Amino acid sequence: MSRLYYTPPFPETQTQIELDEESSRHLVKVMRSREGFPAVLTDGQGHKFIAEITEANPKRCGLFIRERILMPPPKVRFHLYIAPTKNNARLEWCLEKCVEIGLTAITPIICKHSERTRLRVDRLERIAKAAMIQSYGFYTPKVNEPIALKDLLNQVSGQNGSNEVPVLAEQMYIAYLGDETRPLMQALRQIKSANDSDRQLHIGVMVGPEGGFMPEEVASCAEKGIQAVALGHTRLRTETAGVVACHSVRLWADDQADN
């Protein structure tokens, strides 16, 4: 499989584009591509472009767009609501791995035990875009601004949710290790098949900070119909829990697609 490169969105009638310097250098210097060589690009909005190099310039590689293909969006969208970790690198690692698995949106939530309330969203966006390219994805995940848990719960949930604001997903869960909490996979199996409708299914999982969710926070979520689920029988780090939740939803979604 050839490497995927990113290009900002451009008009449908435009057939000539230039890559940025970083992508141009990689394509020309690292991959040793020349005029006439093929290249595959995406704009992060679902388009796959089949292109041909017209100018092998390592600073501004020129390409001719031969074909534009709109790739189908995921049938199941996964939205991770996660408390920022004290160490930024851990959250960034979690985001990268979740995007590789199939994350479509992430919203940092500020809880009572949160030790960090500010994040560089622009940096997280760059990480998400790089992970999308690395994993050959065509839809850039949405990175929302941090929001207090209580404010998030006041959002109005919609059938399809939205990647523009951190609204509650259609199917919401909160990761909580309780004595009678059922596993996430068991809860997912009770959802009506994602193949029974033409619309996308929007699933969200909340993951708390290192100190965990407060009982009253879990109770507030329950009042909104958000089910408590377990991600296993052991206590997980915040970033590990995020990856486990994403992987569980992805496995369930893939199983739905195969049936």
Image (tube, rainbow, N blue to C red):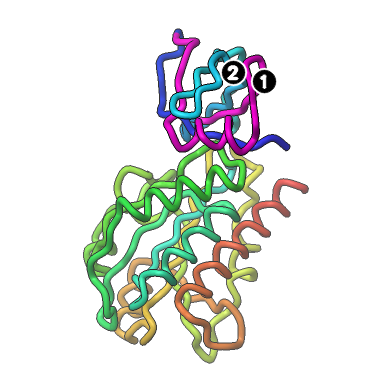
Task: Classify 249 as above or below 104.
Answer: below
Q: Is mark 1 on a helix, strand or loop?
A: loop
41 left or right, relative to 117: right
Tag 2: residue type? Answer: Ile
Tag 1: residue type? Answer: Phe
Which residue is drawn at the image coordinates 64% and 71% (left, top)? 186
Circle 1/circle 2 CB separation < 8 Å:
yes
**Separation of disc 1 and disc 2 at Cα?**
6 Å
| Magenta run includes residue 37 | yes
Label located before the other in sequence (1 or 2):
1
Extreme residue in the right direction: 259
| Magenta run includes residue 57 | no
Q: Where is residue 225 in the image (x, y as percent from the top left)?
A: 40, 67
Q: Where is residue 21 in the image (x, y as percent from the top left)?
A: 43, 33
> What range of the chain is rendered magenta?
14-42
Q: Name the residue under label 1.
A: 37
Which residue is drawn at the image coordinates 58% and 53% (left, top)? 100
Extreme residue in the bottom direction: 179
**Crowding near pointer 2: few (<14 within 10 Å), some, many (20+)?**
many
Q: Which mark identifies residue 53?
A: 2
Q: Where is residue 192 in the image (x, y as percent from the top left)?
A: 61, 53
